[in-house]
Amino acid sequence: MSEDDERARRELALLLRRLTVELDAVGQRFAQRHGLNRTDVRALVAIMDAARRGEELTAGRLGEAVELRSASVTALVDRLEKVGHLRRARDAEDRRRVVLQMSDSAMAAGAEHFGGLARDLSAAMEGYTPDELAVVRRFLVEMTDVIVAHARTPEPQE
């Protein structure tokens, strides 16, 4: 690999870091505005993403998504339900199973806070061809996979 290639890779890594820091700041402003913490926001995003995929999320699967143990997930769900951001509902096919759903007010708050950003991001993509967007998509998926794997790697024991 040439020195120019290595420099380009380092620059992309730095740009990804900057992007994540700025996105985290947007999420943190949302959290502060709505009396939430970082894990609360991660949980709401996990529930919303599952709904967009047509999936229903149980408390157990939410725990996996945000890396919390059962008791902590229960406290998290109780807290988010108490402030009106989510509700527990019986699964239509298996009444024994409880699924988590975002409340309409939480969806509206998210749309209000993040809607402008989503529109601006979409507008910024207008200058890209479908082929370029496909490469960007592949890049972001692969980088996200690397980051998730890194974040979930246990710390070495001393």
Image: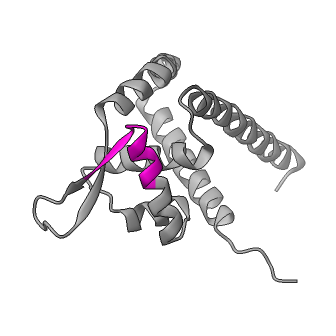
- Residue that appears at 42% across and 25% down: 109
Query: In the rendering, at what x and y percent does residue 137 appear?
Result: 49, 42
Q: Is residue 111 visible?
A: yes
- Residue that appears at 51% across and 17% down: 120
Q: Is residue 97 above or below residue 120?
A: below
Q: Is residue 34 left or right of residue 93?
A: right
Q: Is residue 30 left or right of residue 115?
A: right
Q: Is residue 128 above or below residue 58?
A: above
Query: In the rendering, at what x and y percent does residue 77 appear?
Result: 43, 54
Query: In the rendering, at what x and y percent does residue 133 appear?
Result: 47, 34
Farthest residue, direction left? 93
- Residue that appears at 49% across and 54% down: 76
**Does the magenta portion include 4?**
no
Farthest residue, direction front? 82
120 or 3: nearer the viewer: 120
- Residue that appears at 49% across and 22% down: 113
Q: Is residue 125 visible?
A: no
> What's drawn in magenta, residue-wise?
77-88
Quadrant of the image containing the C terminus: bottom right
100 or 10: nearer the viewer: 100
Query: In the rendering, at what x and y percent does residue 57 appear?
Result: 32, 58
Place residue 58 in its image quadrant.
Answer: bottom left
